[in-house]
Amino acid sequence: MRLRGSRHPLARLALLRLIALLLALWPQAAAHAAGRTVVYCPSLAPVALQPALRNDAASFEASSRTIYDRLLEPSTDAMQPRPALARAWTVSADGLAYTLQLRRDVRFQRNFGFTPSRDFTAADVVFTFQRMLDAKHPYHDVSGGTYTYAQSMELPTLIGAVRALDPYTVRFELRRRYAPFLAVLAMDFASIGSAEYAAQLQRAHRMEDFDLKPVGTGPFQLEAQLAGSMLRYAAFAGHWRGAPAYDHLVFAITPDSTMRWARLQRGECDIIGYPNPADLPAMRADPNVRVISAPGLNEGYLAFNTEHGPLRDARVRRALALAVNRRAIVDAVLGAEAQVASGALPPAMWSYNASATLPAQDVAQARRLLAAAGYSSGFDTSIWTTATGQGLLRDPRRIAVMIQSDWAALGVHARIRSYEWGELLERLARGDHDTALMTWVSDDGDPDNFLASQFSCSGVHTAQNLSEYCSKPMDALFAQALQTTDSARRAALYAQAQQRFVRDVPWLPLAHVNDTYVVSGRLRGELLLPLGRLRFDGLRVVGQDH
């Protein structure tokens, strides 16, 4: 961070306060080594701390996986999630009513001047979902009122009612069958908030504080944050699963992978993700750390804005896809922890269609396609990416440069435009981009979350469908797949959707990357949950158990 000096006394005071906050938040290495603080160094900062309003993994890690809980938790089988705030459930014979029995004695955090007078009940579930579903709800338009996931999955038209049958029973009434509905309740955006806290803030005319100063039932409560740099949490002693086995959790945002590894070696970080592939041999040989890795249900891709200029033509999109050497990108940037992506789904996801894949680089065919589309001399376009942070694609700017070079051989001149992460997401949601380097990580293990979220007409002009791709036949396949719980039938329909993806090429698939984290030897316990989620409350510090 670069600080500019000022002679103005108020500016100097603000600077001193900022420095004091930084010192308070950042645990010194010596104290940290012997303390009860766990430090996670992610590559990207959260954009917001209200899961209902976001769809980026960094925001989910900092909110729904710390401050909040959901009714259900994801498992490796998307159709059979695990109990969480709901301990049991039944589904009506017609598949239109889901009745959930809620856990008792679940406390809300006491934070930001809020002292809860009651435990979690069905009223909090009704509030959470009605805020997203009902345009007339008093909280619907607060903080911008953009519910990316709920809107892209058409939940306002899917869910007819959310009813509290009694304080510990809630029923969701659907207007049509929706096979993965239980998996939806386990997704991050469905994190449960406090209706009582919301009512208190509404009376005080401070409704945006509900999203800025979050209160949930999760294992950690927010203590302080420095936007883009640091978040500090305290263990919530009243959590229904029991208090975490350490006192504080700190997110120290560290975009550079080399710096993350150096901080882990110095004892300033306990957990880092997305390591530099070149550092992995040294990490695996280091007795002071352990490397955790599992196949990821994810995909790094280049989205083509199908509403922009030449990119409206599927022949142009296919030509640009065929011009790119995906293998070279994986080898040069992502290394052994990644594999080349060729289709719309990762191979580890059920219903993956191995026959629906894009061929390897074929520059001659790319030139023929461009000529047939009327662009034999090429055209100008742009590649959008993040200026800071690396995440799944490790070094997106380097990948952008490699794509830019491959396209130049066709006469296609691509300008690389880099933005800070939060600004990039806002611009992409508006559809300003030509192409954009992004990633998608499965939220629930169901192919609908990967396919319909990214390619349905309802996701156009939102932060979900970054290709602005709309195909009525594709939507019809999604709708049919949601109407049946027959896995074989669903898989066949999603296989057809993948064939259409290869024909229309709304994305250029690039890579699937293992979920890889490096953990300090001072930590024990379960860190990596199904679908690559981190469970921070499953850890303990060696020699400092409760």
Image (cartoon, grey):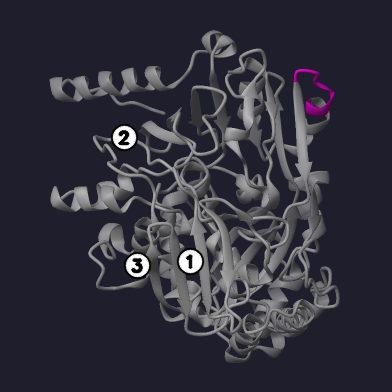
Instruction: Tell me the amino acid under the disc marked 3.
Output: Gln
Q: Amino acid at mark 1?
A: Tyr
Q: Position of residue 524 (x, y in %)?
A: 70, 25
Regarding residue 495, the answer to whether it shows in the image is: yes
Element marked by disc 2? loop
User: Which residue lies under the disc numbered 1?
Assistant: 149
Residue 228 image point, x, y percent:
42, 38
Circles 1 and 2: CB atoms closer than 8 Å? no
Between discs 3 and 2, the one toward the N terminus: 2
Front disc: 3 or 1? 3
**Which residue sits at x=73%, y=41%?**
516
Against 439, residue 527 (above or below) is above
Question: Callout 2: 10 Å neighbours few (<14), some, many (20+)?
Answer: some
Tell me if mark 3 has few (under 14), some (14-19) or many (20+) residues whose alpha carbon lies within 10 angstroms of its own: many
Image depth: mark 1 or mark 2 in front: 2
Span of residues in magenta? 283-288
Which sits in the foreground, 460 or 424? 460
Q: Pick the quarter of the image with the C terminus.
A: top right
Residue at screen point 58% across, 9% down: 34
Task: Say which quarter of the image contains residue 177.
Answer: bottom right
Q: Is residue 287 magenta?
A: yes
Q: Which numbered circle lies on residue 111?
A: 2
Question: What amino acid type should be assigned to the residue bearing mark 2?
Answer: Asn
User: Of label 1 and label 2, which has the lower sequence position?
Assistant: 2
| SS for dot 3 | helix
Q: In the picture provided, is 440 more to the left or to the right than 109?
A: right
Cα distance in 3D space between marks 1 and 2: 27 Å
Mark pair 3, 1: CA separation? 14 Å
Residue 371 quadrant = bottom right
Q: Which residue is mark 3?
A: 130
Please check the rendered image and state whether residue 320 is part of the magenta-colored stretch, yes or no: no
Identify whether 386 is placed above or below 155. Answer: above
